[in-house]
Image: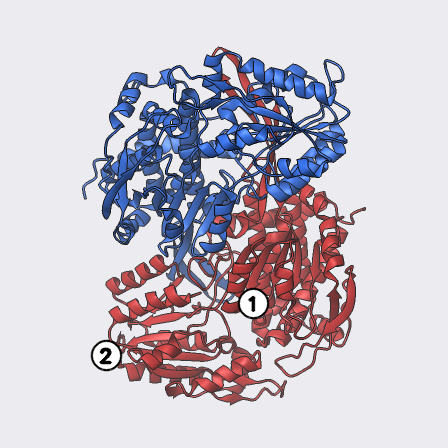
Chain colours: A blue, B red
Amino acid sequence: MTAALSAHELIARHRSTLDQALEAIRTRAYWSPHPEHPKAYGENGSLDAAAGKAAFDALLGTRLDLGQPGTDDWVGGETSPYGIDLGVTYPHADLDVLLPAMKAGQRAWRDAGAEQRAVVCLEILKRISDRTHEFAHAVMHTSGQAFMMAFQAGGPHAQDRGLEAVAYAYVEQVRTPDNAEWTKPQGKRDPLAMTKQFTPVPRGIGLVIGCNTFPTWNGYPGLFASLATGNAVLVKPHPRAVLPLALTVQVAREVLADTGFDPNLVALAAERPGEGIAKTLALRPEIRIIDYTGSTTFGDWLEANARQAQVYTEKAGVNTVVVHSTSDYKGMLSNLAFSLSLYSGQMCTTPQNLLVPREGIATDQGPKSYDEVVADLAKAVDGLLGDDARANALLGAIVNPDVKARLDKASGLGEVALASREITNADFPGAVVRTPVIVKLDGAKPDAEAAYMSECFGPVSFAVAVDSVTDAVELLGRTIREKGAMTVGAYTTDYEVEQAVREVCLEEAAQLSLNLTGGVYVNQTAAFSDFHGSGGNPAASAALCDGAFVANRFRVVEVRREA
Amino acid sequence: MTAALSAHELIARHRSTLDQALEAIRTRAYWSPHPEHPKAYGENGSLDAAAGKAAFDALLGTRLDLGQPGTDDWVGGETSPYGIDLGVTYPHADLDVLLPAMKAGQRAWRDAGAEQRAVVCLEILKRISDRTHEFAHAVMHTSGQAFMMAFQAGGPHAQDRGLEAVAYAYVEQVRTPDNAEWTKPQGKRDPLAMTKQFTPVPRGIGLVIGCNTFPTWNGYPGLFASLATGNAVLVKPHPRAVLPLALTVQVAREVLADTGFDPNLVALAAERPGEGIAKTLALRPEIRIIDYTGSTTFGDWLEANARQAQVYTEKAGVNTVVVHSTSDYKGMLSNLAFSLSLYSGQMCTTPQNLLVPREGIATDQGPKSYDEVVADLAKAVDGLLGDDARANALLGAIVNPDVKARLDKASGLGEVALASREITNADFPGAVVRTPVIVKLDGAKPDAEAAYMSECFGPVSFAVAVDSVTDAVELLGRTIREKGAMTVGAYTTDYEVEQAVREVCLEEAAQLSLNLTGGVYVNQTAAFSDFHGSGGNPAASAALCDGAFVANRFRVVEVRREA
């Protein structure tokens, strides 16, 4: 096969970006090659806003033919949380044809080596980046995220996480040299001398099981980590969020072909409604790696049953914010209000339980009782979402009926401090848009505990009154240990309290944000700097992204001979 | 607690060794700080041969009191494969006392950081090294290895593997900086600025389940990898090989106390005969990491059931040597003869199946038929072991009755090309010493396949006649895929054949030694350079030692706040 893009050209094009990524994961300073601002697109081959929208519109109602072998049907049926039917159909695969076809190109991909695989991955990310505006609409109309969030989280931030995985995968593979000379002295006799060759080899096919809310952001790390370590990758999107990952597969296949590799190294596994192919796929012997984001029930099932595979899961958790004291009461309230509102709380990182001492908290505006704190937070949320246009831009749409059902039920769990409101979306009348509900619970009551000790995914938060900050810290620890947590927040001006919260987070392995009052929110993590999850509590078995996330996706084979 | 040895002193003493180890794992050139020659010991505080022997003798018949909390009994009963009763008793633990006690010192150990943990581990290794002569007798009289092998493999080589694990663990933990400043531009607005702190945190208690044949060599990587990453470590030795690991625990506890840490961070779990505490321990919630060497049955059980833990297993495998052609027939025969004889074939790396084409092989001494190759190999083994003193020094003793039973049965599996002989050990009349048996099998016959496709651990090899080298390569691939392999050897002067064997090893993830005719043997791997196992085939889920072996023994917790 003649490659339109040679290895040399790819390295010239992307090596410096790779080097910058390697430096960023080492220093963990701010860095990103992917612009966050929509207006930054439109030059050097990238689609601007209008072209991206037009490209998305042109996809609607079409068949997305990826040219995959073993396609035995065309399936689809995504309905946007904004109320429109996408009408796109995707290839449905005969696995007994597709999986062997995916293996066919694996040897050449393995033999290409770590650097060439990395720059091919960077070319894929570059072409995805060029289509960020198009992807933004695809993410918006599958996840229900508001446009700007779909643009940023589904575009540059997801691409950053993919690139981060490529950087980790690359550096892990080149830790061992390609070749070594080994000469062992033998006293007066001739030394023993050996020549050794080391080759990173893939495990097989990696399976990425996508989620409804962040198809690209949560899908890219596993996809790129597996691909960059020499594996083929089969992408099984959530049935409600196929398009963003189908487009990703399309780009990957184009780039693989253009660079002289077999496009079947990356393929899509779309499914019929109710088919539930994830279970079937997860147990196929060809699948040796699984990356999964979704429910704890299915994540646990994968870990228990997909024994032939390395399994990386992100599951449910219960995120806590300990509210003890603050030197910036207003900043705290507005920061928390934003965190609770962003994407209607449909983030795995959104705080759920706000633990507030019953006797109240100390602030720069004097002591505030538990009731005052909760009422002021409710006011802050109300103020933030008072304008419908702004509310729509922050909240997005409720992603599916399950979330709405949980929201509807939440107001019966305790005293409602802030009721959820219905918001009209002028552009998309079919969108289900809701403001968050805040429910007051007494932490000491057993029936309240049943509520706050379960994940209530969606725009639902519990303001839990606790007897003391000591109790808050104890409850924080128990919640992480038993339920897991993707994030922990804390507000305190007291060094002892800060240390106690920190100690619990170190002990239970949870990521802690302290005293956030400005423009960084507990639910956001930045690639190359922040870890997403810890891999050390029940919410996730892996962190994005660290050495453990990539190191076991390949093995090193040594061939040695006498020198 | 006042430390007899300060962090500063430890770093001054060991940092340069750590740096050399880090360089060695990067270049994979030859390096070791642990002398292989028995005469190298006796200065700078190390025990010489006589002192080491005396120290060992003084242990016999004593109670080894490690000062562990929760000791409710004293247990023992090791009988040396050389026929003497060791008579040493060890603490038996009440786990409900011991395990909580092991957790008590974990916070200080975590807070000490990666460098201090590394140099404490190096101090442990240094004190073990000083007692190498004593350990050599302990390993000899539990594993049945001959003295020189017990000395080298149980001493410096095991210490090398421990140090290698410390080096990997250290470098993995310092990949992420302790602190980072993150400043994100916001156009005309003030940048977002965050201060981030990153802390490696342990998973909990690591459990090391030792084996009978290489208690230190196979035990040290997991022990030191877990300890260096901040975990406490509970060592559960094989009931027939307690002493070497009990002495290891003794040294570790001394060093931890001397350096100001809680000695209970490392403890021993000895058991009563038939108690089988490994299963109980493996399911304890405190146990979060397990390193295991032993049978496939129990390894599979651990992987399926110890779901709360990271499980690293080395299990059974079937090692193959493909014999196709050679430019040094004599060298090949003597190299293979040594490999089959060393420690009576009781190594997980000993070749079992020698695949020889039915039509014979090309050599520098002309073509040799299958029958000639097998007869010549038998002669080479016979010659190597003709002298009883030399035979004893190479073979050691049969480690336990199970191995002897398999050996006795093997001669009934096919035509015996070389019968096993009984050798007398003048020093230890009770030792069971046997030369290896070589059995001829027809690779095409189903009843033969039942024999050569199972691990027959011990001094048993099968000379399998195959129809062609193509068949040999196919069988090699199938054997690795279905049964696993710690090692693969091949002899060929043909480039195409070499590439075919190499491709199978890359595809099935097995470590390959090509055309060994000198003083390096397929069953030996050198720390810092050779990987032991690949972690990619059924013989082992981990390789010694790579990033994957250490990366998931700790997690990184981030604490971030506005700058």
Residue B466, above or below A114? below
B188 left or right of A108? right
Q: Can residue B492 be seen in this view?
A: no
Chain that bears disc 2: B
Residue B527, label in figure: none
Q: Name the residue under label 2.
A: B359
Residue A166 to residue B310: above or below: above
Question: Which residue ends up furthest to the right in the rendered image?
Answer: B2
Residue at the image point whose x is 34% and y is 85% from the top: B375
Q: Is mark 1 on a helix, strand or loop?
A: helix
Q: How many labels does the image show?
A: 2
Of residues A149 and B240, the one drawn nearer to the viewer in this rendering: A149
Q: In this view, does B269 lie above or below B141?
A: above
The residue depicted at 57 percent of the width and 75 percent of the height is B145
The quadrant in which the C terminus of chain A is found is bottom left
For disc 1, the marked residue is B153
Position of residue B529 measured from the top left corner of the image (x, y, whole percent): 47, 56
> Residue A311 location in percent, x, y?
46, 49
For residue A359, which quarter of the picture?
A: top right
Q: In this view, does B176 lie to the left or right of A508?
A: left
The tag earlier along the polypeptide, 1 or 2, is 1
Badge 2 element: loop
Give the residue type that dot 1 points to.
Answer: Ala
Q: Neighbour class for label 1 at 10 Å: few (<14), some, many (≥20)?
A: many
Eye-nearest disc, 1 or 2: 2
Instruction: Determine crowd level at label 2: few under 14, some 14-19, many 20+ residues with C-alpha closer than 10 A.
Output: some
Tag 2: residue type? Glu
Question: What chain does badge 1 belong to?
Answer: B
Q: Which of A169 and A334 is in front in this view?
A: A334
